[in-house]
């Protein structure tokens, strides 16, 4: 009699396992469908934005070249980057004053993802494109990769607004949460960098890795790949599929080369730390300088122009200079000067308030360092170095890895940008050595320490709608304090959203606010007179982590949940107790 029962239990167990497997399969297909739509849309918009940005940059460069040719003497060339800096300063003061407080485009994008849930002002992409095109087109020492990272993040944020406005989740039957806004910003970073660097795989790894000193958000790698591949294809339709740099040699396993690239990695960490310190020293000097903010980029541009008179290779993005170094067209003396000059020129350009990125300058610095070491190796060990150009590319990857903490992404970016995948082993060795040797030094101050630690935080994966107390008790603003205290006694709640005459949220009041009113005045005093304004709010799609951050930041007991797009409509409240329950696993993540 026992055997049939056991068989029945086995059948039930097998059926449940099959249903669970089917549910996981359907969830995977739903995830693929959702991010094919959202990631693809971000990739298309990001690719088009990159096309427009590069077109603007080329237009400015052409205009500046014509204007520079009319100068009566080359000694006036420093005026060109100074005027470019002046234009950028005036534009930023008028339209994007927040840009002066950030040390670079990539750092602003990282900060937005960590602290603003991927949300950026609507003007971010356009203003970044215009100011960066002016800075780079007039000879500022910076790169176009950083601006496209911020432009891409802005496009991702804009995509989230479009998706919400058009009600695509409802129309296309998928969910869309506050965490998805953050993922779209990451997808935008991958789209921007994948387009201009012509490196979709490395760009996706960069987007999920540059947020942290250690680790990466690998959960979002697939959406980032969809965006970067789409953007790469869109951009290449306009600008072709040619690699950024030419490195046609084939590298075979060579112990001597591995020893040299390991040395390059260690020395690159020293140069990278010097780059970071110089960068932030000048950034702080300009920030605290008692001079109008709009004038500072002009002063920085003038100083960069003076450096350019002595060493023209220090100006601009430096892509042509990198190719010259790969081809060994520059001597050791010029390379040594270029390492120092590029560090100072870039720090002056970006530190003074100019617009641009720090990746291309780091690649130039690394190329010059690698070329210098390569020249020394050829002198000391003639015939031993089979591919001196390898040392140049290893230096490029190592210096940037030492300042950005993305060794694997940088290795793949350079392999894709040269279309030379035989470089992967020496690049990973050099990049890893540089990243480890430089410790926690990073040029991106908005980077968080560890991805693993943050991914373990359940509150980042639980939306507010899952933990909030819905339909909370509210009080009209005209309620007396004595009535409020009675309400506290009957409901055992310590705080309430306050509604105005039209039924919209106007503030929050707690029993502590009421207790401050003298006993003799509680009958005549209304809630409107003691409530806290403005109310601290979240939306249902925000991650619960945002609610906790706001509660800790403002030292309050609760935040009010309001409707997305309608901050006057109260949907619920989130208290510390709700957050504790989420941490305890009562509100499990998806």
Image (tube, rainbow, N blue to C red):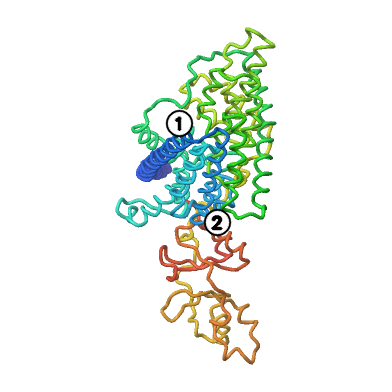
- Nearer the observer: mark 1 or 2; the answer is 1
Please identify the quarter of the rendering in which residue 510 is found: bottom right
- Residues at discs 1 and 2 in contact (Cβ within 8 Å): no
Which quadrant holds the N terminus?
top left
Image coordinates of residue 490 in percent, x first then y, are 54, 81
Disc 2: CA contacts within 10 A as few (<14), some (14-19) or many (>=20): some
- The mark total stands at 2
Secondary structure category for the residue under label 1: loop
Report if residue 29 is visible in the image: no
Residue 433 shown left or right of residue 85 in the figure: right
Secondary structure category for the residue under label 2: helix
Please identify the quarter of the rendering in which residue 274 is found: top right
Residue plotted at (63% across, 66% down): 555
Disc 1: CA contacts within 10 A as few (<14), some (14-19) or many (>=20): many
Towards the viewer: 33 or 374:
374
Could you say which disc has been placed on residue 545 in the image? 2
N-terminal of the pair, mark 1 or mark 2, is 1
Could you say which disc has been placed on residue 275 in the image? none
Image coordinates of residue 449 in percent, x first then y, are 63, 44
Could you say which disc has been placed on residue 199 in the image? 1
Report if residue 122 is visible in the image: yes
Please say if 79 is above or below 121. Answer: above
């Amino acid at each position: 009699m026992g055997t049939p029962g056991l068989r029945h239990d086995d059948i039930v167990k097998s059926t449940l396992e099959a249903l669970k497997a089917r549910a996981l399969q359907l969830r995977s297909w739903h995830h693929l469908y959702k991010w094919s739509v959202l990631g693809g849309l971000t990739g298309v918009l990001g690719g088009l934005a990159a096309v427009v940005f590069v077109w603007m940059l080329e237009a400015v460069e052409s205009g500046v070249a014509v204007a520079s040719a009319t100068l009566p003497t080359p000694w006036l060339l420093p005026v060109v980057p100074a005027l470019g800096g002046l234009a950028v300063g005036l534009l930023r003061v008028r339209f994007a004053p927040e840009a002066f407080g950030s040390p670079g485009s990539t750092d602003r994008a990282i900060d937005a993802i960590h602290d603003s849930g991927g949300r950026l002002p609507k003007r971010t992409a356009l203003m970044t494109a215009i100011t960066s095109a002016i800075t780079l087109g007039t000879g500022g020492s910076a790169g176009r990769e950083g601006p496209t990272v911020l432009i891409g993040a802005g496009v991702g944020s804009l995509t989230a607004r479009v998706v919400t406005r058009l009600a695509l989740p409802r129309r296309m039957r998928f969910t869309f949460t506050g965490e998805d806004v953050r993922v779209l910003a990451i997808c935008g970073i991958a789209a921007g960098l994948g387009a201009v660097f012509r490196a979709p795989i490395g760009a996706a790894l960069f987007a999920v890795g540059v947020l942290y000193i250690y680790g990466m958000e690998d959960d979002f790698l697939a959406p980032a790949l969809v965006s970067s591949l789409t953007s790469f294809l869109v951009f290449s339709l306009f600008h072709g599929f040619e690699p950024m740099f030419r490195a046609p040699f084939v590298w075979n396993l060579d112990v001597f080369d591995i020893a040299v690239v390991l040395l390059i990695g260690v020395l690159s960490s020293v140069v990278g730390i010097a780059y970071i310190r110089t960068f932030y020293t000048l950034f702080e000097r300009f920030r605290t300088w008692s001079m109008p903010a709009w004038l500072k980029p002009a002063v920085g541009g003038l100083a960069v122009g003076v450096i350019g008179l002595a060493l023209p290779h220090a100006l601009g993005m430096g892509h042509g200079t990198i190719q010259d170094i790969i081809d060994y067209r520059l001597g050791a003396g010029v390379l040594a000067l270029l390492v120092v000059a590029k560090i100072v020129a870039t720090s002056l350009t970006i530190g003074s308030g100019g617009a641009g990125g720090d990746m291309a300058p780091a690649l130039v610095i690394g190329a010059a360092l690698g070329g210098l070491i390569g020249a020394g190796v050829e002198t000391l060990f003639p015939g031993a170095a089979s591919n001196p150009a390898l040392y140049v590319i290893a230096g490029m990857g190592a210096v940037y890895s030492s300042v950005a903490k993305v060794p694997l992404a940088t290795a793949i970016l350079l392999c894709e940008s040269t279309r030379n995948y035989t470089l992967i082993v020496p690049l990973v060795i050099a990049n890893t050595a540089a990243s480890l040797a430089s410790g926690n030094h990073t040029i991106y101050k908005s980077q968080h320490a560890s991805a693993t630690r943050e991914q373990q935080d359940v509150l980042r994966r639980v939306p507010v709608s899952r933990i909030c107390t819905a339909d909370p008790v509210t009080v009209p603003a005209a309620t007396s304090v004595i009535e409020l205290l009675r309400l506290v006694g009957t409901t055992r709640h310590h705080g309430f959203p306050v509604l105005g005459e039209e039924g919209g949220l106007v503030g929050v009041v707690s029993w502590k606010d009421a207790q401050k009113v003298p006993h003799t005045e509680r009958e005549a005093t209304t809630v409107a007179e003691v409530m806290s304004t403005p109310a601290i709010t979240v939306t249902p799609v925000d991650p619960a982590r945002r609610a906790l951050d706001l509660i800790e930041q403002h030292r309050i007991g609760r935040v009010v949940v309001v409707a997305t797009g309608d901050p006057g409509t109260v949907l619920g409240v989130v208290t510390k107790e709700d957050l504790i329950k989420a941490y305890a696993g009562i509100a499990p993540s998806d």
